[in-house]
Amino acid sequence: QVQFVESGGGLVQPGGSLTLSCAASGFTFRRYHMNWYRHVPGKERDVVAAISSAGGSKTYAESVKGRFTISRDNDKNTVTLRMNNLQPEDAGMYYCNRGQPWGPFDSWGQGTQVIVSS
């Protein structure tokens, strides 16, 4: 059974930092590219960062380039998103899941909420 457990979100002031973590289980984690997704009510879920299966290739949404860093640990089945210089537009519910070309699993975790406000 595929499962994701996201953590690390919270309330932060503009310019602040957070580190999100995701623990994955139920599939062969090291075989798949992984994404961090952000969902804002009323909008589609967007990919903010992606990492290849071995971790050597990383891509970011234009809006977070230079501020977010994605990483993974294939021994621990975890993927991390370090977010610096957070801005109000970064707020939302963050999820991790499988990336392209397979697309996300049907199963999603509970997500972790990021709120950026002064």
Image (cartoon, rainbow, N blue to C red):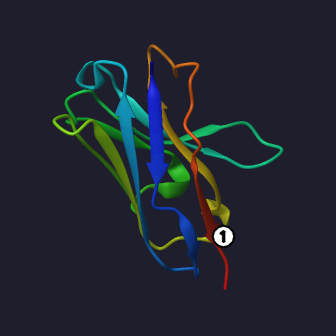
Q: Residue 52 falls in which quadrant of the image?
A: top left
Q: Which residue is mark 1?
A: 88
**In the displayed structure image, the side of residue 71 where residue 60 appears, left or right:** right
Q: What residue occupies the far right of the structure in this picture?
A: 42
Q: Position of residue 114 (x, y in %)?
A: 59, 62
Q: Residue 34 falls in which quadrant of the image?
A: top left
Q: Position of residue 104 (x, y in %)?
A: 52, 22
Q: Position of residue 7 (x, y in %)?
A: 46, 55
83 or 79: nearer the viewer: 79
**In the displayed structure image, the side of residue 116 where residue 78 appears, left or right:** left
At mark 1, the secondary structure is helix
54 or 75: nearer the viewer: 75
Q: What residue occupies the far front of the structure in this picture?
A: 1
Point 59% across, 43% down: residue? 110
**Label 1 environment density (alpha carbons within 10 Å; few <14, some 14–19, many ≥20):** some
Point 26% across, 27% down: residue? 53
Q: Looking at the figure, which quarter contains the C terminus?
A: bottom right
4 or 103: nearer the viewer: 4
**In the displayed structure image, the side of residue 73 where residue 47 appears, left or right:** right
Q: Looking at the figure, which quarter contains the N terminus?
A: top left
Decide: is 74 above or below 71.
Answer: above
Point 79% across, 48% down: residue? 41
Point 16% across, 36% down: residue? 75
